[in-house]
Amino acid sequence: MKKMTMIVILIGMFVWALYDFVEPVSDANFAGNDNYTIENGAAVAVDGTETLNVTAEGVEVGDVASDFELTTLDGDTVKLSDFRGERVMLNFWATWCPPCRAEMPDMQKFHEEKDIVILAVNLTDTETNSKHVPDFVEEYGLTFPVLMDEHSKVSDLYRIKPIPTSYMIDSKGLIQYKAFGALNYELMIQEFEKMK
């Protein structure tokens, strides 16, 4: 019995060492590099001569932001990948959340003054009444897209726990910054200026 246990442990250690040695290249290795684009989960050199496998999608800094599709408050369908080539602020929020209320005026100002796409994902299934969302948008004068996550599919995909949670995604679709809690305008600008 002791021999069998020792064999299992040794095999486990070997498999772990092998995995660690051949682990796929991470997107984090390419963050900030202008010499590649990401196509179908691979980093392709700008001149098209090289293809490196990378992690296709994820929700951590350095990952390609996980794609999703939601309907806006206006009834339009939006996919995150539709905005590849543009810088995006992805924000998860709810009308009942005081820090979300606090950051909305700064997000609106940020949207008006900078060349950034803001996608505000409302955790619709947590709202006591879905009418609160359009009332909130009108009250705060929001002009950026408000996406309705009615069944928590996107908030589950991004493993959202505290709200608000925000992601800054660069023009190549890589997550450059992740924040838990409300952001102020100055911090939004600071992170925006780091992205390409």
Image: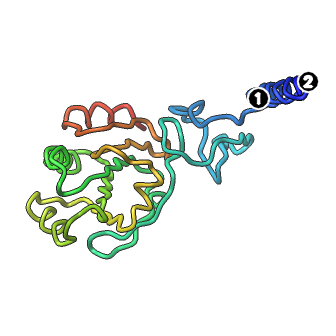
Residue closest to the far right? 3
In the rendered image, residue 183, in percent from the top left (x then y), is placed at 23, 38
Residue closest to the far bottom? 75
Residue closest to the far front? 1
- Residue drawn at x 16%, y 63% is 137
The reply to whether residue 183 is visible in this rendering is: yes
In the rendered image, residue 73, in percent from the top left (x then y), is placed at 27, 70
Q: Does 86 sit above or below residue 46?
A: below
Depth check: 67 or 162 in front?
A: 162
* Side of 164 where 51 appears, left or right: right
- Residue drawn at x 18%, y 57% is 95
Quadrant in the rendering for residue 133: bottom left
Amino acid type, mark 2: Lys
Q: Which residue is mark 1?
A: 16
* Side of 92 where 104 appears, left or right: left
Q: How is the image coloured?
A: rainbow
- Residue drawn at x 62%, y 48% is 56
In the rendered image, residue 139, in percent from the top left (x then y), is placed at 8, 61
Q: Secondary structure at mark 2?
A: helix
Spatial CA span between label 2 and label 1: 20 Å
Amino acid type, mark 1: Trp
Depth check: 1 or 195 in front?
A: 1
The reply to whether residue 145 is visible in this rendering is: no
- Name the quarter where the N terminus is drawn: top right
Q: Which mark is residue 52?
A: none
Q: Which residue is mark 2?
A: 3
Q: Secondary structure at mark 1?
A: helix
Which mark sits nearer the N-terminus, 2 or 1? 2
- Name the quarter where the C terminus is drawn: top left
Mark 2 or 1: in front is 2
Depth check: 102 or 46 in front?
A: 102
In the rendered image, residue 166, in percent from the top left (x then y), is placed at 33, 44
